Image (spheres, rainbow, N blue to C red):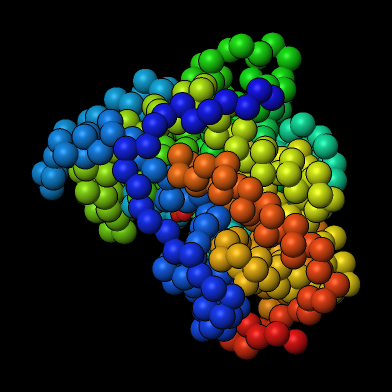
């Protein structure tokens, strides 16, 4: 893919911290070897997450200055609705403070306790809200998604046979909805093809099953369709997004990714009945239906950002930067998830530290080691993130990954070189690295606040 320079120029900078090895050793110990518990000031290049860490544009900041902070009926809400209608094609919108706020509402609205919710691989907050609403998640992603080395171009695809088998097993009336994430975060930022979306739609129409999408990284998904799917080369991403979303009954959206904002989210849908229920719940958990836990200025920033995120040049650079980092690691023999995803490079920590058992927490260990080496912060996406099942046993995911997550419009490829050099250094001395063990395990979403120590 032709590398392109940043399709923007820098107007403001934020100094970042250069640390010594001693400072980093003290910092990671104080953080219990959990990169989530590091202080921002101790982090040099922050690749923990692409969620809420994007740089906003001058157009977004100026839109914020015009934010309408009226408690009810704010113009800012109208601006968001107009932008969602124009760019996503959904007429109805319910704002929430961020994506999990939307997941909370839609889980309560669509799930009757005891029902089943199929989806293309789990995501942590999505699954926990489905379970809290009494649903049972079923992974219906294609098998290739669980194989880091598989180069399937659309590893996010739903396995139609698995979906059909679940329908046959539990009955269509026991399926609350199917949730199709675009892209699939935990599989390595992997896309879903348009053909697969259409095929899932056909099954849902046959059985009257609601087809919902976690559209958090929809722009990146559309860019991969443009790059890889027959018939879409040269089609603008904005057009592909409209076609993708035309097949869904609604979406949960974390604006903190592909709407380029630091906080924000929403539900978007076609069915007035779902909107009515969302409005009844949003006033309890988020705020008035016209602000949903956000300031008016946040709604305006999201209205502008969701449009900017669909720009082809922006996406070519953004995904090109992720690919640049991934290809540097590949060239050095570092095992990563292939194909390289849209928002992050996922290191295969199981292969990287193949002398450690999964119970020795390879991904948690590797994230701590990379920080110690360079001050680069990454995120564990393995056994710690997978948590425990209903019986209290550890889940053992096939993917034991460390995610190097690239914020949008923040770092240059010089920073990517620092990251690559650091990971390669750790890779060269990988045999010296020992595992970690829990010293404190939090009961829910344990990866956020648990603490560890070296074995
Ligand atoms: C695919 C997907 C996500 O990736 C997601 C949040 N992701 C985070 C925080 C991440 O670091 O990947 C969420 C939750 O969004 P939220 O962080 O509550 O705005 C929903 N779906």
Residue 82, position as x, y percentages in the image: 29, 25
Residue 216, position as x, y percentages in the image: 51, 41
Residue drawn 63% across the image and 27% down it: 3
Horizontally, is 178 left or right of 433 in the view?
A: left
Residue drawn 63% across the image and 54% down it: 419
Which image quadrant: the C terminus? Answer: bottom right
Picture quadrant of residue 274:
top left
Query: Is residue 429 visible in the rendered structure shown here?
Result: yes
Q: Height in image: 273 above or below 345?
A: above
| Residue 142 vs residue 308, the one in the foreground | 308
Residue 141, position as x, y percentages in the image: 74, 43
Residue 180, position as x, y percentages in the image: 61, 39
| Residue 95 vs residue 177, the one in the foreground | 95
Residue drawn 78% across the image and 67% down it: 396
Horizontally, is 3 left or right of 408 in the view?
A: right
Q: Height in image: 71 above or below 402?
A: above
């Amino acid at each position: 893919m032709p590398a392109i320079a940043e399709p923007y120029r820098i107007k403001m900078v934020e100094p970042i911290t250069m640390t010594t090895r001693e400072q980093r050793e003290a910092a990671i110990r104080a953080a219990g070897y959990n990169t989530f518990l590091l202080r921002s000031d101790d982090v040099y290049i922050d690749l923990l997450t692409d969620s809420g860490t994007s740089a906003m544009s001058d157009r977004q900041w100026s839109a914020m200055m015009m934010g309408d902070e009226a408690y009810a009926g704010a113009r800012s809400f109208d601006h968001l609705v107009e932008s969602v209608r124009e760019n996503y094609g959904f007429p109805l919108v319910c704002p929430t403070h961020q994506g999990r706020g939307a997941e909370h509402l839609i889980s309560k609205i669509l799930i009757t306790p005891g029902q089943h919710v199929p989806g293309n691989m789990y995501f942590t907050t999505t699954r926990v809200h489905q379970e809290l609403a009494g649903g049972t998640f079923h992974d219906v992603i294609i098998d290739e998604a669980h194989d880091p080395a598989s180069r399937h171009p659309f590893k996010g695809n739903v396995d139609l046979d698995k979906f059909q088998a679940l329908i046959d097993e539990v009955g269509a009336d026991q399926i609350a909805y199917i949730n199709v994430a675009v892209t699939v975060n935990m599989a390595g930022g992997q896309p879903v093809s348009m053909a697969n979306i259409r095929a899932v739609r056909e099954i849902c129409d046959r059985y009257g099953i609601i087809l919902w999408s976690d559209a958090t990284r929809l722009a990146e998904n559309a860019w991969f369709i443009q790059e890889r799917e027959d018939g879409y080369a040269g089609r603008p991403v904005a057009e592909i997004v409209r076609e993708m979303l035309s097949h869904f009954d609604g979406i949960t959206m974390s604006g903190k990714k592909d709407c380029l904002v630091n906080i924000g989210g929403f539900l978007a849908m076609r069915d007035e009945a779902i909107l009515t229920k969302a409005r009844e719940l949003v006033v309890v958990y988020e705020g008035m239906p016209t602000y949903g836990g956000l300031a008016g200025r946040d709604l305006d920033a999201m209205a502008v950002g969701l449009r900017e995120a669909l720009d082809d040049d922006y996406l070519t650079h953004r995904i090109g930067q992720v690919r640049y980092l991934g290809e540097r690691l590949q060239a050095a023999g570092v095992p990563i998830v292939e194909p390289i995803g849209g928002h992050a490079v996922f290191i295969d920590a199981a292969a990287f530290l193949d002398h450690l058992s999964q119970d020795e927490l390879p991904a948690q260990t590797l994230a701590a080691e990379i920080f110690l080496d360079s001050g680069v912060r990454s995120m564990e996406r393995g056994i710690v993130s997978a948590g425990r099942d209903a019986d209290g046993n550890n889940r053992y995911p096939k993917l034991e990954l460390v995610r190097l997550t690239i914020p949008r419009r923040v770092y240059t490829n010089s920073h990517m070189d620092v990251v690559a050099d650091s990971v390669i250094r750790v890779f060269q001395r990988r045999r010296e690295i020992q595992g970690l063990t829990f010293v404190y395990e939090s009961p829910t979403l344990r990866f956020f606040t648990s603490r560890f120590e070296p074995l």
